Amino acid sequence: MSSGTITAIATPLGEGGLAVIRISGPDAVGLAERIFVPAGKRTVRPGAAATHTVHYGHIVRDGRRIDEVLLTVLRAPRTFTREDTVEISCHGGVLVTRLVLEAVLAAGARAAGPGEFTLRAFLNGRIDLAQAEAVADLIHARTELALDAANEQLAGTLSHRIQTLRDDLMRTSAHIEAHIDFPDEDISPDTHGTLLGRLDRGDVLIAGLLKTAKEGQVLRRGIRAAIIGRPNAGKSSLLNQLLGHDRAIVSPVAGTTRDTVEETADVRGIPVIFIDTAGLRETDDHVEAEGVRRSRAALGKAELVLHVLDASGPLTEDDRSLLAEASGRPRVIVLNKADLPAVLRLPEGLTGVATSCSSGDGIEAVKDAIEGAVWSGRLASVPSQITVNARHADALRRAQGSIQRAAAELRGGSSLELVAIDLRLAADAVGEIVGKTTTDDLLDAIFSQFCLGK
């Protein structure tokens, strides 16, 4: 994947005002020479163009004019890939975009694989592997918090901490291996303490980073929140209020919702996948019964429960059963129909958020409660600037285990060879995060998740 000149459409497929075809590689400018015809007195051919300049003209293939375009010339190394790069801005029709791409391919370029432009940026040393992953996070960010976290990682905040940790491990390893090479020289007490101090600092740093893994999962993937309750409690109305538009059908007839309805919303910077469920009750209606079964399945997979109760009536046996079913799980109890006289009394120890889904009163308080349920308890009190992903967490756990073994061996007077092996394993695991140690399979797994053109 790392050789030749590559091309791809860098904008979403479909009709639009503009489309961009990106070209990168040693023959990017020469290839553009073969298909671009300048127009206007001041426009020059790509080969004579200065770097970071834009030129007006036409894309031509076999003497046939395909489209009127703007062509940008970017010369290495001041480009995203650190290779010569050309970007063609053409009209955004499906056919014209495809024909321009075909002209580029016919002139000698190869179709880029998923994420191949970013892979080249990594292989050419412009970004490390953690920053490359941040590019994908940036593209897929669904909330401002997720965007901020991706930008921090792209700026190298995580990479800096990882590199500091790896440097400490490498220095410690060098000291240990020096004493292995010269066994007559005992490790002095001061040096012994310094080495252990580095390992302890590394252990603490890793523990701090691992605490952000759950936050990273939430920001990247979102959380699933099941809206449950007995029929006609106001579940669909709550979903519509949280989304800010009508998504689910609302009716005074109990049992209107027969299937689960999913929609994602930004709640205080958290991507929340709301699942409106069918009213949970016993029923002889086969269609409604299937909806209830699917609702219970959705409830089982949800990380947060929004339990909607009708505050204008007394607590029913169905309500009590659902309260017991969802006990022990992160949940927010929503006391709907607060615009009516309050009748319902919650069991001792439970509190709810009063709201009126018909008027929207109390919806902001529900959002506050969702935010509190997500960030409290199992997560940090506020999202961090640094959030590790699942791959980083796996590498950090392996590194932490090796560091702890090395420290225990050093304290216990074990063979220095064993200490050296664990230090090497720890350094390699940490290096995987930024790409200092990697494999082709790992790169394929990471970059295959990217979109074409990036």
Image: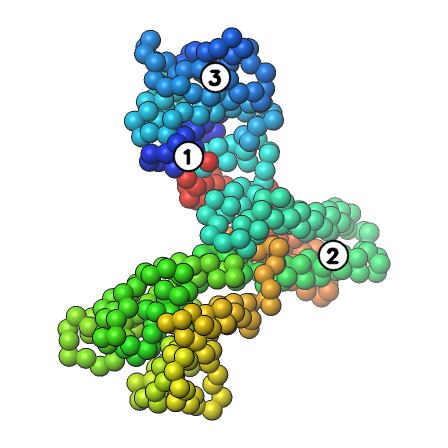
Dot 3 crowding, Cα within 10 Å, few <14, some 14–19, many 20+: many
Mark 1 or mark 3: which comes first in sequence? 1
Dot 2 crowding, Cα within 10 Å, few <14, some 14–19, many 20+: some
- As helix, strand or loop, the secondary structure at mark 2 comes to helix
Residue type, numbered disc 3: Tyr
Residue type, numbered disc 1: Thr
* Residue located 42% across and 69% down the image: 360
Residue behind mark 3: 56
* Residue located 38% across and 79% down the image: 337
The x and y percentages for residue 302 are 39, 68
Residue behind mark 1: 11
Residue behind mark 2: 198
The x and y percentages for residue 129 are 55, 42
The x and y percentages for residue 446 are 46, 44
Gap between marks 3 and 2 measured at Cα:
58 Å
Res. 75 in view: no
Gap between marks 2 and 1 measured at Cα:
47 Å
| Front in this rendered view, residue 198 or 349 | 349
| Front in this rendered view, residue 339 or 426 | 339
Marker disc for residue 316: none
Residue type, numbered disc 2: Arg
Q: Is residue 290 left or right of residue 299?
A: left
- Kindly indicate the quadrant of the structure image that contains residue 345: bottom left
Mark 3 or mark 2: which comes first in sequence? 3
Gap between marks 1 and 3 measured at Cα:
20 Å
| Front in this rendered view, residue 264 or 421 | 264
Q: Nearer the viewer, mark 1 or mark 3?
A: 3
Res. 30 in view: yes
For the N terminus, the quadrant is top left
Q: Nearer the viewer, mark 2 or mark 1?
A: 1
